[in-house]
Image (cartoon, grey):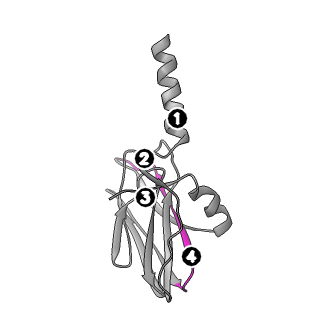
Amino acid sequence: MRRVALLLWAGLGFVDGCAVNGSPFERVHPPPGYATLYVYRPYSYAGSLLRPSVSCGEDSARVGPGGYHAFVAPAGQVECSVEGGESRDQVEIVAAPRVYYIREEIGWGVLTGHPHLNPMDADQAQDEIQSCCVLQR
């Protein structure tokens, strides 16, 4: 019984914190004329083992559940894409020098999860990204 209680307590701590090991959310300060695109993935058990590569402009990163990555790109047209085993999704943004939020989600697929990129409203995204951590490279 003691072992079950300990496992439940540890599991609650895991769900409440970041699934990605890293620092809590911090704003990035890009140089003038650059846009910041935060790609984040709120923790969800569905697809929690999948970490497809996300690319925005020239940079790429693997965003795990409960994690985020700040992409800094020159203002202009920026394409962000994610590729899973069975599918690919992309978002094109005509970026001004400001902040953009893109939520990555993993949907159900036949053999593996299907990643999706969804541009988000800043108010909703700021609430969601606060519980995410940056992956330490």
Helix, strand or loop status at disc 4: strand
Q: Mark 2 touching mark 3, by CB under 8 A?
A: yes
Nearest to the observer: residue 18 or residue 113: 18
Q: Amino acid at mark 1?
A: Gly
> Alpha-carbon distance for marks 3 and 1?
26 Å
- Residue 31, relative to residue 48: is it above or below? below
Q: Amino acid at mark 4?
A: Val
- Residue 119, relative to residue 30: is it above or below? above
Q: Which mark is residue 79?
A: none
> Alpha-carbon distance for marks 4 and 1?
31 Å
Q: Residue at x 42, y 46 (%)?
A: 47
Q: Which residues are magenta?
A: 95-110
Q: Mark 2 highlights which residue?
A: 47
Q: Position of residue 11 (x, y in %)?
A: 49, 31
Q: Nearer the viewer, mark 2 or mark 4?
A: 4
Locate residue 114 relative to residue 128 in the image: left or right: left
Q: Mark 4 touching mark 1, by CB under 8 A?
A: no
Q: Mark 3 highlights which residue?
A: 115
Helix, strand or loop status at disc 1: helix
Q: Mark 4 highlights which residue?
A: 99
Q: Position of residue 10 (x, y in %)?
A: 48, 29
* Residue found farthest to the right: 123
Nearest to the observer: residue 84 or residue 10: 10
Magenta span includes 102: yes
Helix, strand or loop status at disc 2: loop
